[in-house]
């Protein structure tokens, strides 16, 4: 009788074991099917799911599988992500602070979403990276360009990925007493969907005498290298005066000086890699001034390139706007505006510098140096109205030292995943 009970218990135990094993096998098969189903998700559907996630999540998801890693890193995915994000995202302001000694640098992201009337910008993120160099900023479609020890550095603020490009073996060498200036500009070629860097190297003695310049281009892709640009026949050696301004999707523009009295707008077509030079009219100013006394910058006026001249703003309270109406025929038109009396105190005895335009076409003017609080001025050329916009959230340690800064208003910035290929 006892033996029978023992046998029955063993049978029951074996039956439960078989059921447990069956459950485990079934669960394992189900999980395997899920994994297989996840891998078999159509790539277009998977892209639509992934582009709705935050950038940091997408970076982590690269570890799921080789398929996910290659998909998230591919150019098509980055393009789709950029197209979606830019439709919903507000423009951003990026600011680089550098102390006089150059021992400390900080890169800040500034948002205006918390200020409906746009009277205040707030620092929302510290994007500083170890060993960050540079001062002038260029931002194009989620990628930032600055120089580190005279080398071009590409930085993705979304992924915190940085790529330093190789040095350029220049064909022109600075002699004793000559100055060498190297500037980098980043642009996007929509036809070939490529990012390209333009490097302008200028060498001259005092007062732009013996001026020589050359230009190099780098295609940002695996195996890329610097290639020298052969200028067209109407090319003039020049020294850049401002950071590049990206406009119309595929052209980099910047102001330059051919000599102490001759100013020009230089344009680089990112697709064709051609350089053109258009002289600013000699009568652009009532009184001829040397380059070191002219206060002007390149801006976008509607869909046109324009030179915003504020040389006489703080003394005579006037600005001149020279608009390039027809680049092919080199036709310019002039507009002059006088500041309203109630707004003169905003510019009195303050040295300003042009920092581009906002999304609604206002010219951004920033004080060259500030020691107590940060702010910018936004000038509406249409209504002749000047407004002050404060920048809050900057660490207070910067107000106790001599520093300078660069500010870039980006109208096509995205929080996208744009991976840099090495």
Image (cartoon, helix red, strand yellow):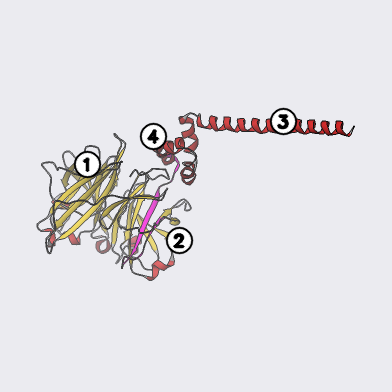
Q: Mark 1 points at which residue?
A: 325
- Specify whether residue 182 is in view: yes
Position of residue 169 relative to residue 82, above or below, is below
Residue closer to the observer: 65 or 231 = 65
Residue carrying label 2: 393
Real-space CA distance between mark 4 and mark 2, rounded to the nearest whole angstrom: 37 Å
Badge 3 crowding class, 10 Å Cα cut-off, few under 14, some 14 to 19, many 20 or more, is: few
Q: What stretch is highlighted in magenta?
A: 87-108
Inter-mark Cα distance, 4 to 3: 50 Å
Is 104 part of what is drawn in magenta?
A: yes
- Frontmost of labels 2 and 1 is 2
Residue 196: say if magenta.
no
Q: Position of residue 247 (x, y in %)?
A: 29, 43
What is the CA distance from the residue labelled 4 to the residue labelled 1? Answer: 36 Å
Question: What residue did someone put label 3 on?
Answer: 18
Instruction: Write the residue at 57% across / 29% down.
Output: 33
Which callout, 1 or 3, points at the residue further toward the start of the chain? 3
Q: Earlier in the sequence, mark 4 or mark 3?
A: 3
Q: Is residue 202 above or below residue 188?
A: below
Label 2 – label 1 distance at C-alpha? 41 Å
Return the mark for residue 76.
4
């Amino acid at each position: 009788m006892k033996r029978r009970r023992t046998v029955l218990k063993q049978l029951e135990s074996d039956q439960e074991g078989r059921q447990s094993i069956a459950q485990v096998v079934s669960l394992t098969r189900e999980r395997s099917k899920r994994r297989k189903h996840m891998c078999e998700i159509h790539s277009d559907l998977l892209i639509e799911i992934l582009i709705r996630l935050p950038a940091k999540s997408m970076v982590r998801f690269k570890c799921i599988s080789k398929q996910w890693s290659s998909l998230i890193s591919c150019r098509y995915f980055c393009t789709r992500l950029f197209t979606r994000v830019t439709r919903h995202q507000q423009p951003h302001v990026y600011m680089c602070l550098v102390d006089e000694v150059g021992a400390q640098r900080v890169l800040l992201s500034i948002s205006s979403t918390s200020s409906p009337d746009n009277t205040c910008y707030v620092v929302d993120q510290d994007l500083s990276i170890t060993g960050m160099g540079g001062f002038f900023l260029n931002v194009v479609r989620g990628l930032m360009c600055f120089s580190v020890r005279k080398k071009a550095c590409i930085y993705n603020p979304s992924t915190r990925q940085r790529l330093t490009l190789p040095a350029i073996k220049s064909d022109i060498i600075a002699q004793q007493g000559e100055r060498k200036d190297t500037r980098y500009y980043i642009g996007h070629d929509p036809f070939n969907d490529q990012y390209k860097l333009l490097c302008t190297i200028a060498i001259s003695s005092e007062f732009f005498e013996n001026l020589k310049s050359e230009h190099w281009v780098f295609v940002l892709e695996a195996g890329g290298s610097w290639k020298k640009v052969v200028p067209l026949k109407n090319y003039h050696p020049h020294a850049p005066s401002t950071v590049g301004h990206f406009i119309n999707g595929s052209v980099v523009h910047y102001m330059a000086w051919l000599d102490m009295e001759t100013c020009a707008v230089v344009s680089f077509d990112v697709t064709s890699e051609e350089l053109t030079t258009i002289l600013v009219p000699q009568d652009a100013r009532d009184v001829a001034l040397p380059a070191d006394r002219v206060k002007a910058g390149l801006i976008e006026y509607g869909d046109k390139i324009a030179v915003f001249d504020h040389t006489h703003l703080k003394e005579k309270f006037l600005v001149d706007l020279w608009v390039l109406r027809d680049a092919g025929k080199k036709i310019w038109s002039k507009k002059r505006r006088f500041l309203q009396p109630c707004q003169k105190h905003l510019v009195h005895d303050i040295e300003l510098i042009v920092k581009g335009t906002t999304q609604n076409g206002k010219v951004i003017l920033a004080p060259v140096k500030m020691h107590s609080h940060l702010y910018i001025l936004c000038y509406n050329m249409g209504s002749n109205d000047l407004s002050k916009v404060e920048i809050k959230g900057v660490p207070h340690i910067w107000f106790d030292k001599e520093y300078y800064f660069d500010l870039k208003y980006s109208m096509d910035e995205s929080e996208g995943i744009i991976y840099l290929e090495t």
